[in-house]
Amino acid sequence: MREAASVASNFKVRPCPHCGAPFTPPRARQSYCSRACWHSAISGRARDLSNQRFHRVLVLRRAANDKNRRIMWHCRCDCGTEWTVRGAHLTSGRIKSCNCRKRDIAQQFIKDLVGKTFHRLTVLRQQAGSKRNSTYSGPDWVCECACGNIVTVPGSFLRDGITLSCGCLKRENGIRLGTAHSGKLDLTGHVFGWLTVERTFAKDKANNMIWECRCRCGNIKRVKATRLASGSIVSCGCRKPNKKTPLMPEDHRLDKRRKEHARRAAGGSFSGSQIAELMTKQRHLCANPSCKKSIRKHYHIDHIQPIKLGGCSDISNIQILCVSCNTSKGAKDPFTWANGQGRLL
């Protein structure tokens, strides 16, 4: 307590340099009695930016401080827009225009979509005076729908497939889903992916119609009508996801047998010890010189000369590749594959 009293006695009462009121500073470096006096004093000593130009911005006059007491200036852009800007944003170069500069830069990269068709929409012309001339959404385009309606759509919505029609497609899908949901639409004989609708089964507690379907693999699947119409279910579960042309189970077995017969007819064989020895020779690295990934955990055993091109299964025709290299090589000739990677002239 005595030490605190002695420290406090070191700060004498002094007048505030702005308002003149006497005060005892709690800290040695505090010169003003309050933060308000400090802001007022700093604002009074602020740099005068009147009639100065910053890129496209011309400063007209001093404006009232904002709610945080920061210095503001009333400015005019070369395009005629007037607004209030922070002085720090002008002097630091953060503000160069009223946003018209960004629109002018984006206008240079706009692609002409006139005459192009996006699903049901055909682009007629660019919307005059569009406010969306930015690098994100692009300008607005006037389009004609297949039903005859004229709509205005942002360019990014057309390119990304967000807008497909004037709204008629959504209404048609709503009607189709609604009739299928209520059971008014007869789906017997319709094909949805790998499912063929055979007959109605029942209705659930929410009065949704359930249809009995037969999958291409022969299994029976009972699905709601809305799930069929929306495309969320296309098989009984046998169709593998993320496959553009998935194989049926029977076709998959036949394909494995066909490959096994071709491997046996080619002649030659190798053992696990030979693969381990080859792995040591490759120093546990991919055999592709331009890759050299580690194959300690995941690797593929590859035929240097593919069996389809007359190769055999002897250990002299075997190399160990990483998964990505073996996938890219496939059944290609080794010289063709190396040439495609730029390793041959």
Image (cartoon, rainbow, N blue to C red):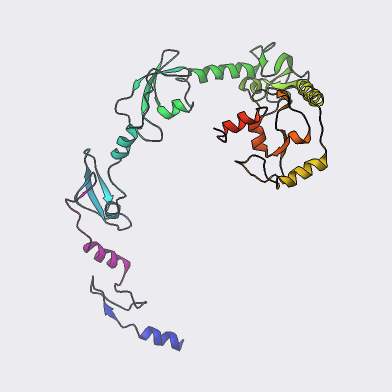
Quarter of the image with the C terminus is: top right
In terms of depth relative to the viewer, which is nearer, 129 or 244?
244
Does residue 19 sit above or below 180 in this rendering? below
Residue 203, position as x, y percentages in the image = 72, 20
Residue 225, position as x, y percentages in the image = 66, 20
Residue 167, position as x, y percentages in the image = 47, 20
Residue 111, position as x, y percentages in the image = 38, 27
State which quadrant residue 146 falls in.
Answer: top left
Give the tally of numbered discs: 0
Would you say residue 53 sits in the magenta stretch?
yes
Left or right of residue 203, residue 83 in this image = left
Q: Residue at x 58, y 16 (%)?
A: 176
Would you say residue 122 sits in the magenta stretch?
no
In terms of depth relative to the viewer, which is nearer, 87 or 314?
314
Q: Residue at x 48, y 22 (%)?
A: 164
Residue 337 can be seen, yes or no: yes
Residue sitting farthest toward the left: 51
State which quadrant residue 191 falls in.
Answer: top right
State which quadrant residue 91 falls in.
Answer: bottom left
Left or right of residue 43, residue 328 in this image = right
Does residue 27 sit above or below 119 in this rendering? below
Q: Residue at x 22, y 47 (%)?
A: 75
Left or right of residue 339, residue 93 in this image = left
The span shown in magenta is: 26-54
Residue 215 can be seen, yes or no: no
In terms of depth relative to the viewer, which is nearer, 10 or 128?
128
Q: Residue at x 36, y 35 (%)?
A: 134
Left or right of residue 11, residue 215 in this image = right
